[in-house]
Image (cartoon, rainbow, N blue to C red):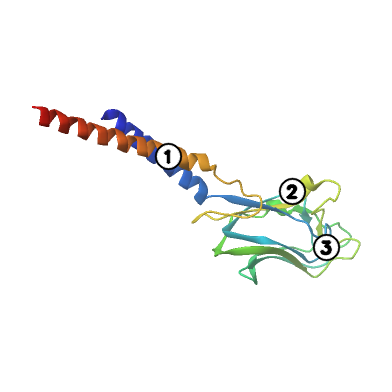
Amino acid sequence: MRMGRSLVIIGAAVASLAFGAAANASTTVSWNGFSDFNSASISFAPISANQLTSISGPGTYEGVGYTTTSFSLYLDLNGSWTDVLNWSVPAVSKGANPPEYLLSSISTPINFSSALVSGIKLTSSPSGQWFDPNYETFSQWWCDSNSETFTFTNTSIGGGGQGTTPLPAAAWMFGSVLAGAGGLQRWRGRNKRRSVTVAA
């Protein structure tokens, strides 16, 4: 009897952990557009998400120098470009070089209503010179691992899409088997007691 209860508890714990892992599945998208630009976008297979969890990589942004420069991050949510973040950098002294900042330094996570995410767009205003744009080093054709990456998460119902690491099906099966074994153990215990009663 005790063994049966233990198996049921273990099975329930495994199933709970499995559900928790699935509910927080993340998908990472690599920037595959222009490496240096003033405004650009990329598209990808739709991902169910409600959070841009993190940004990483070598991508930088800088202002034009002579005036304040505004930047925006848009996401394609359910087929519509949605502005999810705005920031700016101030002008610098005449003759000074504008500082560069890593895009990964902006504050994350960025939350939004659950949707299918299928694109990322970055804009800036005013635009930098063609030889010195406001966004730089977002992708390197000779080394994909050095591209800017964006990680999305569905914190409510689980993520999906390219780059997602799915929960192994064996985990669900293991939990079900343990729970079933516990139920079988209890059923046998009841039948045994019933047999003893009839014999008496």
Viewed as shown, does residue 150 lie left or right of 18? Answer: right
Q: From the viewer's perspective, is residue 28 above or below residue 70?
A: above
Identify the residue at the far left of this view: 200
Mark 2: few/some/many CA within 10 Å (<14, 14-19, 20+): some
Residue 150: x %, y % from top left? 68, 54
* Residue with the mark numbered 2: 57
Viewed as shown, does residue 81 lie left or right of 181? Answer: right
- The residue sitting at 20% across, 30% down in the picture is 192
Q: Secondary structure at mark 2?
A: loop
Viewed as shown, does residue 41 lie left or right of 171? Answer: right
| Marks 2 and 3, the one that precedes in the sequence | 3
Q: Amino acid at mark 2?
A: Gly
Residue 84: x %, y % from top left? 62, 65
* Residue with the mark numbered 1: 175
Residue 9 in view (yes/no): no
Q: Amino acid at mark 1?
A: Gly
Q: Secondary structure at mark 3?
A: loop
Q: From the viewer's perspective, is residue 142 above or below residue 65?
A: above
The answer to which quarter of the image holds residue 3 is top left
Mark drawn on residue 89 = none
* Residue with the mark numbered 3: 37
Q: From the viewer's perspective, is residue 8 above or below residue 109?
A: above
Mark 3: few/some/many CA within 10 Å (<14, 14-19, 20+): many
- The residue sitting at 80% across, 68% down in the picture is 67
Residue 96: x %, y % from top left? 86, 57
